Image (cartoon, rainbow, N blue to C red):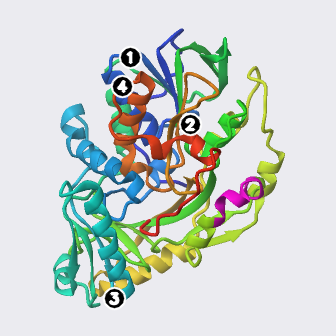
Amino acid sequence: MGPKVETVADDTTLPAQVDVVVIGGGIIGVSTALYLSEKGLQVALCEKGHIAGEQSSRNWGWVRVTHRDMREFTLSIESLKLWRKMDATLGIDTGFNQCGILYMTDEDAVMDSHHVWLDKARHVAGDTFDTRVVDGRAVAELLPGATKAFKGGLYTSGDGRAEPQKAAPAIANALRKRGVKILTPCAARGIETSAGRVSAVVTEHGTIRCNSVVVAGGAWSRLFCGNLDVDVPQLLVKASVLRTEPLDGGPTCSASNKKFAFRKRADGGYTVAFGFRTYSDLTPDSFRLFFKYVEALKSQLGALRIGIGARFFDELRRPRHWALDRPTAFEAVRTLDPEPITRYTDAGLREFTKVFPHLAHARIAQRWAGYMDVTPDAIPVISGVDTVPGLFIGTGFSGHGFGIGPAAGKLMADLVTNDTPLVDPHAFRLNRFSDGTRIVIDAGF
């Protein structure tokens, strides 16, 4: 079972018409709805399950600029600004805490990579962020109680953490008070067009007329868009984490190296993962998209494990096109709830307690897993669709969606309304996968 998520009351009373329908109730969807509503538009959000039921409640909870790909670096800076004022602006509690994030290492090659990344970041953003390379003594001060000495690391004191089980639901509840329709459980079956452009969304409960649609469906975006013959290259990667019971005396900053990652939780426990170890099932899309993902596979050697199981046959049997007047896959599976890989989660906790032996009494409260929607270049799609005017897609956040979610939503709102964009959206355009642009994986992840 996934983590317990804060409650957003169910509502399936559809409006007849709005300006924009947002499909998907994760952090990207609710952030997009927030900034569209701030522009004065009438917005309805449709979520087939419950708000933040999938990866938006299952991630690490990090909000960082540290080690971002340069193509999304300015977006991450803007998102951190929005996270810092979110609670005060909306009168909510997302659990945001400016705790600092540290990438520590005892390898010279990794230290060299930190210097390279920092030089790139300063070239892109000047002095608008506070990341610095730190030595072993500084790492020891940031990790009180650690018995392992590290050579150094990369540290950003302005980075933070928020609570994935609270954040998107808190935003959704605030939006409802502002008049945004938050529709749950309400699966969107598809989109209707008129004269070639978006005119309505068909849901399991009826039709909502609209001028624009934003697909922020996370793991489901590729399937949904495929029914419109819009190809969104995206595969799913499973990440497993655990949380501990409350612990006293541990570090307050969030940190990671190759073997484990952690953050302090608002409930006093820790969220712990086995470094960046992930797992991916082979599926029919793995073969359809193989050549687009060759560079990604090369970059993940040693971190990604691949297997084959029931998902292959489930997706092989799943229709790729369907009529809108009958139940769909989105109603058959309300929430993706994969089994965690316990050997990963428990290995992460063992490494954590090796470094912090005074926390060796840590007790596992829960394990869970979630599916990250990953693009071939590990950079999201935040884009209009040239072939379907009025259709916009925000997906493929590749494990970065929670941290950059608010800014991604604000950028999407700018694109929908054709306003000056928050940042240059060129790197996030959908057609980069079909216009001959070379797929590049940033080694800085």
User: Looking at the magenta stretch, what is its main secondary structure?
Assistant: helix
Point out residue 438 in the picture as x, y percentages from the top left corner.
59, 56
Q: Quick check: 20 left or right of 208? A: left
Q: Amino acid at mark 4?
A: Asp
Instruction: Name the element at disc 2.
Output: loop
Q: Is residue 287 left or right of residue 441?
A: right
* Relative depth, front residue between 278 and 133: 133
Figure quadrant of the C terminus: bottom left
Give whichever of discs 4 and 2 has the lower sequence position. 2
Q: Residue 10 lies in magenta, yes or no?
A: no
* SS at circle 3: loop
Give the Cα separation between the discs numbered 4 and 2.
Answer: 32 Å
Query: Answer yes or no: do the residues labelled 4 and 3 have beta carbons within 8 Å?
Result: no
Q: Which amino acid type corresponds to the residue marked 1 in the rendered image? A: Leu
- Residue under label 4, please give it: 419
Q: Which badge, 4 or 3, comes first in the chain's sequence? A: 3
Q: Nearer the viewer, residue 45 or 211?
A: 211
Which badge, 1 or 3, is on the more N-terminal residue? 1
Give the residue displayed 43% in from the left and 79% down from the top. 258
**Whole-number angstrom distance, CA of label 1 to CA of label 3:** 51 Å
The residue that label 2 is drawn on is 49
Q: Residue at x 30, y 87 (%)?
A: 357
Q: Is residue 290 magenta?
A: yes
Q: Amino acid at mark 3?
A: Asp
The kind of residue on which mark 2 rests is: Gly
The Cα–Cα distance between marks 2 and 1, rounded to whole angstroms, is 24 Å
Q: In the rendered image, which residue does mark 1 sit on?
A: 41
Q: Position of residue 411 (x, y in %)?
A: 38, 36
Stretch in magenta: 285-294
